Amino acid sequence: MAPDRTLDFLRYNQWANRQLLKACAKCSPEQWVHPLPGSFPTLRDLWLHIHDAQYLWFQRIQGRSFSAFPSHSMSETERARAPEHVLDSGQAFLDHFAHADSDFWDTTVVYTNTKGVPFTQTTGEIVQHVCNHSTYHRGQVVQGLRTFFPGDKVPATDYIWYCRKKANNSGT
């Protein structure tokens, strides 16, 4: 994938996260931690998982591997700041790659996952994974918002909506 397109996916990822986090801002503290069906039990846990993935993959690209997800050792006060963590880890990713050379996207990254299993990927593959991973879990966030606010409009965060807004110079 061309570096400019890959970088655009990181911009899209950050934009989409912002859109849904704005929608989540209307959730009460009780709704934020209310049990939901799916792979993560609450909206807060979904967002912390998105943060964990962005953070871990960014660290792996820089040669660091971890045996646990960062949110697992956070205090309750830190866990409550899930939206900030998501935006911060996404912005760190975006800022770092905005200045990368074109060869960087094909750089091989050797890392171990949280279970200690070694893998090798290119930075471009990792960026694509991070964006797709976030998209998948944002879909679960949408389901949670629809559970709490039936009938309310949830922001469209498909990539094509981002492209349309970008083309019109609005909302990016």
Image: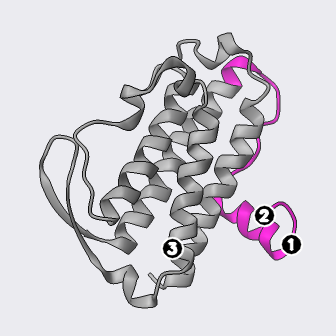
Label 3 sits on residue: 97
Mark 2 element type: loop
Whether tag 2 and tag 3 are in contact, CB under 8 A, the answer is no
Q: Residue 70 placed where, x, y %?
A: 38, 37
Label 2 sits on residue: 172
Label 1 sits on residue: 169
Q: Is residue 81 above or below residue 50?
A: above
Question: Could you tell me how far apart the alpha carbons at marks 1 and 3 are, in whole angstroms?
Answer: 22 Å
| Amino acid type of the residue that numbered disc 3 sits on in the rendered structure | Phe
| Amino acid type of the residue that numbered disc 1 sits on in the rendered structure | Asn
Is 168 in the magenta? yes
Residue drawn at (57%, 44%) of the image: 86
Question: Could you tell me how far apart the alpha carbons at marks 1 and 2 are, in whole angstroms?
Answer: 7 Å
Residue drawn at (69%, 27%) of the image: 145
Question: Could you tell me how far apart the alpha carbons at marks 2 and 3 are, in whole angstroms?
Answer: 18 Å
Which callout, 1 or 3, points to the residue nearer the camera?
Answer: 3
In primary-sequence order, the first of circles 2 and 3 is 3
| Amino acid type of the residue that numbered disc 2 sits on in the rendered structure | Thr
Front position in the image: 131 or 79: 79
Whether tag 1 and tag 3 are in contact, CB under 8 A, the answer is no
Q: Residue 151 placed where, x, y %?
A: 81, 25
Q: Quadrant of residue 172?
A: bottom right
Q: Quadrant of the N terminus?
A: bottom left
Residue drawn at (64%, 62%) of the image: 12
Q: Residue 122 placed where, x, y %?
A: 30, 73
Mark 3 element type: helix
> Which span of residues is magenta-colored?
146-172
Mark 1 closeness class: few <14, some 14–19, many ≥20 residues within 10 Å: few
Whether tag 1 and tag 2 are in contact, CB under 8 A, the answer is yes
Mark 3 closeness class: few <14, some 14–19, many ≥20 residues within 10 Å: many
Q: Is residue 68 above or below residue 9?
A: above
Q: Quadrant of residue 28?
A: top right
